[in-house]
Image: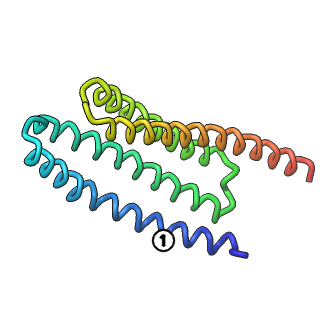
Amino acid sequence: MITEHRAVTALRVFLVLLFALMVFFQTFALPGQFAYMAEQSPDRAYLRWPMTAVAVFLVLCMQVVILSTWKLLTLVETDRIFSEVAFRWVDVIVWAVGAGWVVLLGALTYVALTWDDPGLPLLLILSSTGVAVLGLLMVVMRALLRRATALRADMEAVI
């Protein structure tokens, strides 16, 4: 069975890798893809910069989640996860997911009203649903953290 220390270390390695990939996407892949799309579909070329901005913002929201997760892992390692500091980082995750969800809903609304191909709207519906589930899961996890923190405080008072 994998130990907590090994799991935290492995998660940190993958978080660094994921963050680096997201920086690459923000700076090269997404702007390049939308420039290519503008060349291939001149009738939708006006969407190049708005789509780039939305995509980069969504990646930024994911990067905020990664950094907050890193901070929470630090609290786990130092056995301070059941503290008020942890709630701040969980709140940052909830707000970042919420901001991303709102932007996705805006993009979905625009695309659903103007697009003739069902592929992109369906992809945005899937993404919006997944982000909503993630956000609600984080709200539930925050409530569980609150209960566990209260139980730990009660146990420390008894001992």
For the point 38% across and 42% down, which residue is it?
123
In this rendering, is residue 40 above or below 124?
A: below
Q: In the drawing, does residue 76 fall left or right of residue 52?
A: right
| Placement of the N terminus among the 4 image quadrants | bottom right
Residue at the outermost right position: 158
> Which residue lies under the disc numbered 1?
13
For the point 67% across and 56% down, which residue is it?
80
Q: Nearer the viewer, residue 52 or 34?
A: 34
Q: In the drawing, does residue 126 fall left or right of residue 145?
A: left
Q: Nearer the viewer, residue 37 or 52?
A: 37
Residue 64 in picture, x, y percent from top left? 42, 49
Q: Amino acid at mark 1?
A: Val
Q: How many marks?
A: 1
Circle 1 sits in a helix, a strand or a loop, which is it? Answer: helix
For the point 34% across and 63% down, which residue is it?
21
For the point 20% across and 59% down, which residue is it?
28
Residue 14 in picture, x, y percent from top left? 47, 68
Residue at the outermost front position: 117
| Placement of the C terminus among the 4 image quadrants | bottom right
Residue 77 in picture, x, y percent from top left? 63, 65
For label 1, the crowd category at 10 Å Cα-Cα, with few meaning under 14, some 14 to 19 and many 20 or more, is few
Residue 9 in picture, x, y percent from top left? 56, 72
Q: Quadrant of residue 53?
A: top left
Which color scheme is applied? rainbow
